[in-house]
Amino acid sequence: MVKNKVTFLCESCGYTAPSYLGRCPECQSWNSLSEQISIKPKTDTVRTRGLSAPAGMNPKSAIVRLSEVEMEHTAQFGSGFPELDRVLGGGIMPGGYVLIGGDPGIGKSTLMLQMASAVGQQGKLVLYVAGEESPFQIKMRAERLQLATETISVLAVTNIHQVLEVIKAATPDLVVIDSIQAMYCPDVSGTPGSVSQIKECAAILMDAAKTLNVPIFLVGHVTKEGVVSGPKLLEHTVDAVLYFEGDKYQNLRILRTVKNRFGSTQEIGVFEMAEGGLKEISNPSELFLSQSMLGNAGNLPGSVVAATIEGSRPILVEIQALVGQSAYSTPRRVGNGVEFNRLHQIVAVLERRLGLDFSRQDVYVNVVGGLRIDEPAADLAVAVAIISSVRNLSVIPGTVVTGEIGLTGEIRPVRQALNRLQEAERIGFKRMLLPQMDLAKASAAKGSPAPSKLKSFQVSTIADAIKACFDPSNQPGPAVPVKASGYTREREYEFIED
């Protein structure tokens, strides 16, 4: 009798150890190794996939020159959601292999079910593989969402070989696996959701997607750290990795792409969870701005509008800051929606270049609406919001701010500045602060005129930006180089001292 071999597999990176280790030597994760019993399969796992090259084929005949490869004219087709198509890079790619992850209850299954119904209404065959729900439960949810149930075919099995046989026999136009952690392969040891099971099931489905040219969407659970559960190899295998973000107690949902072989990795899709399911937000700027900001009725101290770029889309968001006396020996720095290290850097620049003292004050920064801003073009807006809060002064109504702050206090250029100007003018703002640039040259390169109703203030230093934000009578002029001698920060900052 053959004795089964016991190994320990890291659930984070897939590292295999002969004995238990408290810390994985590969990814340095603690308590991530789980016991796995290796059972020798009766048949070769690769052969059971049924999609590899037949036995006896000459390996040399499978080699082809890239110039001799015949291109199949199979265009992308829409998912029924323009926001989802934007994130996917234009639509669903035939043979595409997409992984979508998110927290429990965020709406992953709802989005996939609505997408399946929309694709089915285009006359395409959609197969929804339900590994966690029964067909009855899926129909109840579809009727609650008022979806066309006759356009969706449901397969309630978890055996990956049975799923593969149905895909090969039916050749659907779209397959949704909900979820990959519920699938299991009988030829591999481990329970469903383990590293070995996810790795093998993902490999089988990838082989099916590429060989049969069928797009497959995988729904994946996430861990408490916010990453997709299972081996990291799963994200390397797929063509696109999408994360569905948002607070399940609020209505806003953001679909963000982390990896995409067919498009940009910086696009986002904005949705709103309503009673009838997920609804697209075609104008996210108005969603992220308060009514006082949209009406230009005047801002409250500590609030400013920033012009950001997500992929190819300009979005205006409201950034709020609160500065108060600290009750602790070490003051707190809290940033929601902004990078934590970036916030520390902005505070340090304000202390050094403007003579402010935050050593005994807590600084809180929040991006309204739950959006996360990664680009450095929001630096200037964060700095203006902090100064507005510490001096209890409101920014001039109708002002939008964008710009990256350097360590020497200079305002560095940002990309797609003209698109930010046009978005601010479309929303109805009157003033915009941006770094020094040639607007005429940018308009000629893009082929569209610069905004005429929006007054632009081109600034080179933080002092110029602060003056343009708070003092209507002080217009930003040409940049003045800072000298080591004869430079007083109090003189440039005196207009907001009182």
Image: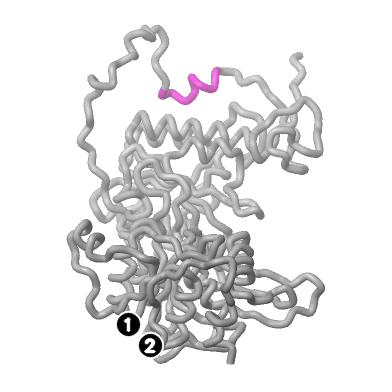
Residue drawn at point x = 43 percent, y = 23 percent? 50
Residue 207 in view, yes or no: yes
Asked whether 200 falls inside the magenta stretch, the response is no
Name the colour scheme: one colour
Label 1: how many residues lie within 10 Å, few (<14), some (14-19) or many (20+)?
some
Label 2: how many residues lie within 10 Å, few (<14), some (14-19) or many (20+)?
some
Q: How far across and how far down the image is residue 65, in percent?
A: 28, 17
* Main secondary structure along the magenta-highlighted residues: helix
Q: How far across and how far down the image is residue 383, in percent?
A: 54, 72
Q: Which mark is residue 7?
A: none
492 vs 49: above or below: below
- The mark nearer the N terminus, 1 or 2, is 2
What type is the residue that disc 2 sits on? Answer: Asn
Q: How far across and how far down the image is residue 308, in percent?
A: 41, 65
Give the extent of the magenta segment: 44-51
Camera-side residue of 255 and 384: 384
